[in-house]
Amino acid sequence: MAYKVAVVGAAGYAGIEAVRLLLDHPAFNLVAITSNADAGQSLASVYPSFAGVSDLTFTTHDDPVLATCDAVFLAVPHTAALAAAPGLLAAGVSVFDLSADYRLSDPAVYEAWYNTPHTSPELLATRAFGLPELFADDLSAAAARHAAGESVLVACAGCYPTATSLGAFPAVNAGWMAAGAAVVVDAISGVTGAGKSANARTHYCSADENVEAYGVCKHRHTPEIEQILGLPDRVVFTPHLAPLKRGLLSTVNIPLAEGVAQTLTTEEAVERYRAFYQGRPFVRVLDAGQMPKTSSVAGSNACQIGLAVNARARMLVVTSAIDNLCKGAAGQAIQCANVVFGLDERSGLPLTALPV
């Protein structure tokens, strides 16, 4: 059975990645792509890589065909999803939101970090959080509701929170972290993570041959990471911009409890992480002594994790690599949709990165 789907905001980097993946999906039939700025233009004229592959044309965000779909992927900036999601849900369309609008459980936290009122906080009570490896129960409940005929809302995790949380969660869950300590995260993303519209930091002359920190002590993904890990006000998150098109590397420093630091080895940490992620096809824990690279996950929905125990400093260092546009955005949304629609979660998603 083919399900009708659409991508709203399809001309942006996350949106066009969703288009790329959905066009090859065995169960989702992509019937509409929207972009107010590109309405009336063919997909291939805006992105020539689709020449001879698809004859889709961009329409506007108010295209009535959206209400006839089984699912809509919202690849839009924050606040735009607040405007779109309630109406689609009311029309019986399941929504997979790539923006931040429904990620934070407390609307007051959203309003504090995003400086805008949350206009549909009632949806937060029933939305599923879209990080399948850590929130399987949320997605299973959404799948059951969908099977019963309901439309469901899935708030897909952000790129930095995905890489960081997949790296940190097993250690926090195991009780290895020192009581009251803070997790320190240094993460690096490619320029596509900033979106398609260039600014003074992201245009070529600024980004090329340059690495810089930004959003220090105030990046909006901080409360999302704290929410996932259950560590309110205990995450020090510093993102960096690197001259890459795509890719994200997050290094997480977790202070270890004294007894743990004295006994835990890197090999034991690897064993624990592999047991935690057993059966999760997109997460790969590397052997002791190996660390991931962004090039090893580019173009795939995979996450690679490397571990090292610094016994002298009583610290577990976890490095996690994802493709920010795939596992960090579009691929993750499709993975969530696969679960909700009762499909193999791997459907339509690349398991292997580009080797060169």
Image: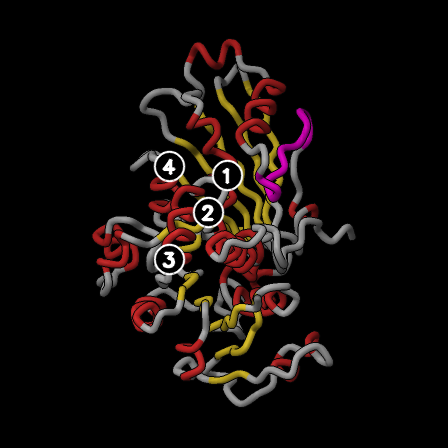
Among the 4 quarters of the image, the one containing residue 124? bottom left
Residue 43 higher or lower than 242, as above or below: below
- Contact flag, marks 4 and 3 (Cβ < 8 Å): no
Residue 233 higher or lower than 199, as above or below: above
Q: Circle 3 sits on which residue?
A: 148
Residue type at numbered disc 2: Leu
Front: mark 2 or 4: 2
Q: Secondary structure at mark 2?
A: loop
Residue 270 higher or lower than 264, as above or below: below
Q: Give percent across and percent down for residue 303.
A: 60, 43
Residue type at numbered disc 1: Leu
In whole angstroms, how far apart are the C-alphas of marks 2 and 4? 19 Å
- Viewer-closest of 207 and 279: 279
Front: mark 4 or 3: 3
Say if residue 342 shows up in the picture: yes
Residue type at numbered disc 4: Val
Of callouts 1 and 3, the N-terminal one: 3
Among the 4 quarters of the image, the one containing residue 1? bottom right
The residue sitting at 45% across, 67% down in the picture is 71
Q: Which mark is residue 235?
A: 4
Q: Is residue 113 magenta?
A: no
In whole angstroms, how far apart are the C-alphas of marks 1 and 4? 15 Å
In whole angstroms, how far apart are the C-alphas of marks 4 and 3? 39 Å
Front: mark 1 or 2: 2
Q: Which mark is residue 166?
A: 1
Where are the magenta residues, as a range? 280-290
In whole angstroms, how far apart are the C-alphas of marks 1 and 2? 9 Å
Residue 129 higher or lower than 274, as above or below: below
Front: mark 1 or 3: 3
